[in-house]
Amino acid sequence: LNPIWISGIDLEGTARDVWPDGDRAYVAAGGGFGVIDISDPFHAKRLGGLDLKSGAAYLIRGDGSTVYVADNVEGLIAADVSDPARVKRIKSYRFRVNDLWIDDSYLYIAGMGGLTLLDRSDPLRLTKAASFNTDGKPKLVRASGNLIALYEAGKGVWLLGLEDGELKKLSLFDPFDDVRDMQLKEGRLFVFTSKNGLMEVDVTDALSPLLKTVYPNRGDQTAIAVADGSV
């Protein structure tokens, strides 16, 4: 592969996370976040954003109307981006966040002691829907349908099922290495490790995850993405 630079945009502070959402990208940078129009990738432009006026924004997830930002001072902040030129803070919540994931119904928070699912039907009142407790500190969480992957350092990747509003432990996949990133999509779990490289795991039967392929690490990559059948 020979990636080609298309365009870029200047933001205040260091960009720490980005979340694509259709023709937009939300970027956590410095002490806030920006909403970027990427409908024309050759001419990306900033539509708006929000200065959190606190610490450093380091994680961001969004779905077109609401964005959730993890901040190292306030915790978790919900913001209304339905009008990107006039972004409004909705509410802040005291969560210690190591990682975030989002779908149509829930906000998934990996933090000290385990995983918490929040019902996000009302951003003004995020309510606890389910939880899964661990002994350590989960670092990464991904979800696809009713299947959830939760990486806990020193343990491995927990595969959890969401059934009748409860999280159930299905299995534990041990990559025998530190996991830098992972993605879960259509019955496949992609686990990117520090030394072993990229692992493709068949989780069609989440009770018995099956390692299919290992792709060697060919550089100092830190993250992966899955799109159109490619990683």
Image (cartoon, rainbow, N blue to C red):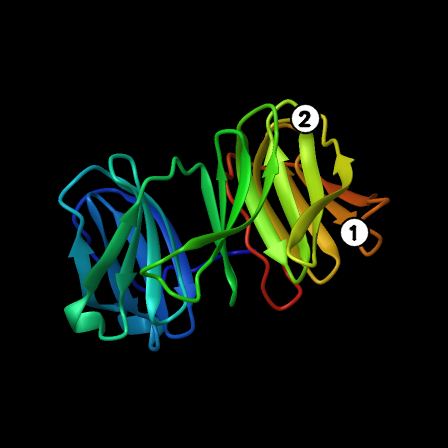
Residue 28 picture location, percent across and down = 29, 50
Say which quadrant the N terminus sits in.
Answer: bottom right
User: Which residue is located at x 16 percent, y 72 percent?
Assistant: 85
User: Which residue is located at x 53 percent, y 27 percent?
Assistant: 137
- Mark toward the start of the polypeptide (2 vs 1): 2
Residue 187 picture location, percent across and down = 75, 58
Check disc 1 and report its element: helix, strand or loop: loop
Residue 24 picture location, percent across and down = 35, 70
Total marks placed: 2
Nearest the eye: 68 or 24 = 68
Residue that numbered label 2 is attached to: 155
| Picture quadrant where residue 210 is located | top right
Say which quadrant the C terminus sits in.
Answer: bottom right
| Picture quadrant where residue 64 is located | bottom left
Residue flagged by tag 1: what amino acid is it?
A: Val
Q: Is residue 98 visible?
A: yes
| Picture quadrant where residue 35 is located | bottom left
User: Which residue is located at x 86 percent, y 44 percent?
Assistant: 208
Looking at the image, is 170 positioned above or below residue 89? Answer: above
User: Which residue is located at x 79 percent, y 45 percent?
Assistant: 213
Residue 218 picture location, percent across and down = 60, 37
Check disc 2 and report its element: helix, strand or loop: loop
Is 136 placed left or right of 97 in the picture? right
**Distance of mark 2 from mark 1, alpha carbons?**
18 Å
Circle 1: is it few (<14), some (14-19), or many (20+) Cα within 10 Å? many
Residue flagged by tag 2: what amino acid is it?
A: Lys
Residue that numbered label 1 is attached to: 203
Circle 2: is it few (<14), some (14-19), or many (20+) Cα within 10 Å? some
Q: Are marks 2 and 1 in contact (CB under 8 Å)?
A: no
Is 114 placed left or right of 97 in the picture? right
